[in-house]
Image (tube, rainbow, N blue to C red):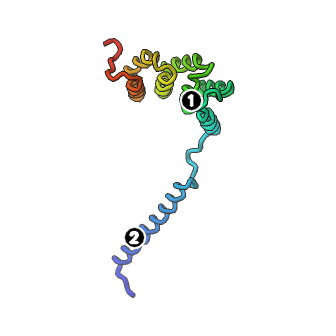
Amino acid sequence: MDLSMRNRLVLAIAGGALLVLIVLLVWGIRWADGRGPKSFPIPPELRQASERSRAIASKEDDPGALTAQDWADTQSMIADPDWRIRARGLTVLPLFKRTIYADQAWQLALAHLAHAEPISRTFATHAAAALRPDEAARYIAPLLEDPDKDVRDAAKHNLIRLGYSTIRRPGS
């Protein structure tokens, strides 16, 4: 069968497109089930902090189950220079609300409301609101003027959650 040059070109392009489609499909399936390339490996410290924060969070229903080691781990995570680990520590901080570490947890939350990194201020607003809802508003309200939009949004969200339906900006 004699094919014209044009037909051969169309056939070659269609075959190449089909081959590319098959490769992309196989590659997509490998990525979906976790066998794809590991271009973003999780550092071991981050994996360990994630596992530790999950273990602490699993004790949410029983504050009496929280141990001194849990508190030490939380403090260690919050003091970590990596914001991802620090955020995990701030996330579990409210679990210490009904423990002997409640005052120290409150002080850590307040300290991070003024942290240099916006992500820490964002997570600290949630922690402060959960630790002492009756006192947190006066510390969170100034963050409505924060230069970072995510921090302002977190402050607004937490103030509304605390029952402030009309939010006045500080100084007004």
- Location of residue 109 in the rendering, given as x and y in whole percent from the top left corner: 53, 21
Q: Quadrant of the N terminus?
A: bottom left
Quarter-of-image position of residue 80: top right
Q: Quadrant of the C terminus?
A: top left
| Residue closest to the eye, 45 or 125 | 125
Marks 1 and 2 sit apart, C-alpha to C-alpha, by 56 Å
Quarter-of-image position of residue 164: top left
> At x 33% / y 12%, what residue is drawn?
171
Q: Are marks 1 and 2 in contact (CB under 8 Å)?
A: no
Left or right of residue 101: residue 109? left
Element type where label 2 sits in the image: helix
> At x 45% / y 17%, what residue is drawn?
134
Residue placed under numbered mark 2 in the picture:
13
Q: Is residue 110 visible?
A: yes
Q: Is residue 34 above or below residue 158?
A: below
Q: Please report whichever mark, 1 or 2, sits nearer to the chain's N-terminal start.
A: 2
